[in-house]
Amino acid sequence: MMKAVWYEGFGPASEVLQYGDLPDPEPAQGEVLIRLHATGVNPSDVKLRAGARPGAVMQYPRVVPHSDGAGVIEAVGRGVDPARVGQRVWTWNAGWQRDFGTAAEYVALPSHQTVPLPEGTSFAEGACLGIPAMTAWYALFRDGPIEGKTVLVTGGAGTVGRYACQMAALGGARVITTVSSPEKAAHSGTADWINYRKSDVASVVQDLTGGEGVDRIVEVDFAANQDTSLAVLKPGGTIAAYASASRMAPELAFYPLMFMNITLQMFVVYRVAPETHARGEAQLDGWLRDGKLSHAVVPCGKLSDAAAAHEKVEAGQKLGTVVLEI
């Protein structure tokens, strides 16, 4: 028996999350069994547990939450190279359309959803990669290189935004970001930053770019920033939007966007095509091996502290990804 966290119904973390013993999973054909050392807690995990998605229903009698984690492969199923045993890995989509995520001592996953983790990257850091880092990568590179481009990252102190600022610079782009305080600007690590609470973002972006504007926006809130996007994007530019929390059904400025030849890319990282995901994994691997990515890990205790970790994410009182050690 292994230790795990699970819930059997939606509700507040302190009321529905349970910690105890569950049977160890076994790897099926094409799967690997991972002894997890860390699990990442993302906003999507918290929303799923709370039943905050529109039309949410419990699809399984019991759910072990969390998609992101890192650990060591201990066994493999039929059809998987036995040489993978002992490999350090990070996971992705562990909790997507499944009832068994990474909030446990062990998880069995399809082999391709476990990615080698370089020795220089800790398990806690590896638990930050699946959703935040891959979302940032996809928003920037899904349609090709960005070298020589100017990229605006909204919310550069967020879990996705901070990675996007780093990756855009590594990809050869000039990076501008928006934040709400000097502390968050420092956390983003970006020299060109704008306090969106105190400045007119569009005017400052135009000043910073000599009136040329930006080629791409990595967008954390499409509805809130649509007008600004139209004011700062170059013709033919791209909005890569991964959220619109301020208004989930925003009114689209269709003709202004159309006459600027703007490409609006709306996406969720869970549905990235496997071959594209593999391309992102390879680029992340190179950066990790070269020590070029920094990670904002927010330690929040052990697996038994899962309820407090969920509450910390819900409260927004953190700069980085909340991680539990296992």
Image (cartoon, rainbow, N blue to C red):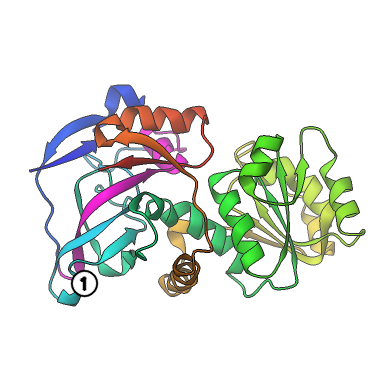
Instruction: Return the residue nearer the eye: 22 or 170.
Output: 170
Can residue 11 be seen here? The reply is no
Image position of 45 (left or right of 317):
left
Residue 31 drawn at (x, y percent): 20, 66
Residue 210 drawn at (x, y percent): 92, 59
Residue 113 drawn at (x, y percent): 32, 64
- The residue depicted at 15 percent of the width and 75 percent of the height is 82
Task: Tell me the kind of residue under disc 1.
Answer: Arg
* Quadrant of image for the C terminus: top left
Figure check: 100 above or below 74: above
Instruction: Return the residue nearer the eye: 1 or 231.
Output: 1
Q: Which residues are the magenta region?
A: 29-56
Can residue 262 be seen here? The reply is yes
Secondary-structure class at tag 1: helix
The quadrant holding residue 60 is: top left
Please name the residue that numbered disc 1 is placed on: 84
Residue at the outermost top position: 15
* Quadrant of image for the N terminus: top left
What count of labels does the image hold?
1
The quadrant holding residue 184 is: top right
Residue 47 belongs to the span the image colors magenta: yes
Q: Residues within 10 Å of mark 1 (few under 14, many from 20)?
A: some
- The residue depicted at 50 percent of the width and 68 percent of the height is 287
Figure check: 220 above or below 136: above
Residue 318 belongs to the span the image colors magenta: no
Figure check: 138 above or below 225: below
Figure check: 143 above or below 192: below
Instruction: Return the residue nearer the eye: 139 or 35.
Output: 35
Residue 156 drawn at (x, y percent): 64, 47
